[in-house]
C-alpha cells in the first residue's frame, strides 16, 4: 500500500534544519569526532524515503561519509546509517557525548525532530536495530 505523500521541505526549512544539526553536532564528525570540514548526511537515504529532518541528519567528515556510503550494512549496524525499513526516529544512532569530567565517550541515542536526543542503553539499541521498538 502506498502511503500519503509528505510535502518536501522548503529551502528555508532545509536551511533551518541544517543549521540546527550543525549546532547540535558541534560542527564535528559524529563517527570520528574530527572538526573542520563536515558534511550533512542523511542517516536514511533520501532515495529510501529519508527526509530532511533533524532525526535523520548528522554530520560526518568526508572520509567517514565515504565509508558510510561504501558500507551501508556496517554503517547501520554501527549506528551511522538507517536501513530502508526503519524510521530514523526509532533507529538508534551513535554520537559522542561529553562526560562530567570533560572527556568524551560514544553512546547510543535516539534523535528527535527538535535537534535533540536521548541516550538509550546498548541493549535497547540492539533491540531497536533488530526491529523492536521497546
Image: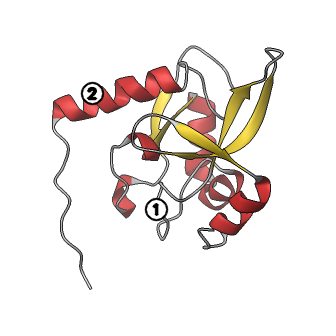
Viewer can see residue 95: yes
Q: Which residue is mark 2?
A: 15
* Quarter of the figure that contains the N terminus: bottom left
Labels 1 & 2 near each other (Cβ < 8 A)? no
Residue at 55%, 39% (x, y): give it: 117
All told, the count of numbered labels is 2
Label 2 secondary element: helix
At label 1, counting other C-alpha atoms closer than 10 Å, the crowd grade (few under 14, some 14-19, many 20 or more) is some
Q: Position of residue 128 (x, y in %)?
A: 64, 65
Quadrant of the image occupied by residue 20 = top left
> Does residue 128 lie above or below 56 as drawn?
below
Q: Which residue is mark 1?
A: 87
Viewer can see residue 32: no
Residue at 71%, 60% (x, y): give it: 124
**Left/right of residue 45 with respect to residue 108 in the rendered view:** left
Q: Between 118 and 64, which is closer to the camera in this rendering?
A: 118
Q: Between 56 and 134, which is closer to the camera in this rendering?
A: 134
Spatial CA distance of label 1 from label 2 is: 22 Å
Residue at 66%, 20% (x, y): give it: 34
Which numbered dot is residue 106? none
**In front of the other: label 1 or label 2?**
1
Q: Between 126 and 57, which is closer to the camera in this rendering?
A: 126
Q: Position of residue 49 (x, y in %)?
A: 34, 61
**Left/right of residue 70 with respect to residue 53 in the rendered view:** right
Q: Position of residue 17 (x, y in %)?
A: 33, 32
**Left/right of residue 91 with respect to residue 120 in the rendered view:** left
What colouring method underlies this structural image? secondary structure
* Quarter of the figure that contains the C terminus: bottom right
Label 1 secondary element: loop
Q: Position of residue 111 (x, y in %)?
A: 52, 44
Amino acid at each position: 500500500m502506498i502511503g500519503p505523500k509528505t510535502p518536501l521541505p522548503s529551502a528555508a526549512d532545509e536551511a533551518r534544519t541544517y543549521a540546527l544539526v550543525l549546532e547540535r553536532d558541534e560542527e564535528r564528525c559524529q563517527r570520528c569526532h574530527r572538526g573542520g570540514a563536515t558534511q550533512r548526511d542523511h542517516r536514511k537515504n533520501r532515495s529510501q524515503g529519508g527526509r530532511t529532518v533533524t532525526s535523520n541528519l548528522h554530520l560526518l567528515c568526508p572520509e567517514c561519509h565515504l565509508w558510510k556510503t561504501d558500507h551501508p550494512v556496517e554503517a547501520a549496524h554501527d549506528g551511522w546509517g538507517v536501513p530502508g525499513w526503519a524510521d530514523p526516529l526509532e533507529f538508534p544512532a551513535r554520537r559522542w557525548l561529553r562526560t562530567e569530567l570533560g572527556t568524551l565517550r560514544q553512546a547510543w541515542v535516539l534523535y528527535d525532530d527538535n535537534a535533540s536526543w536521548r541516550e538509550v542503553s546498548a541493549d535497547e539499541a540492539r533491540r531497536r536495530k533488530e526491529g523492536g521498538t521497546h
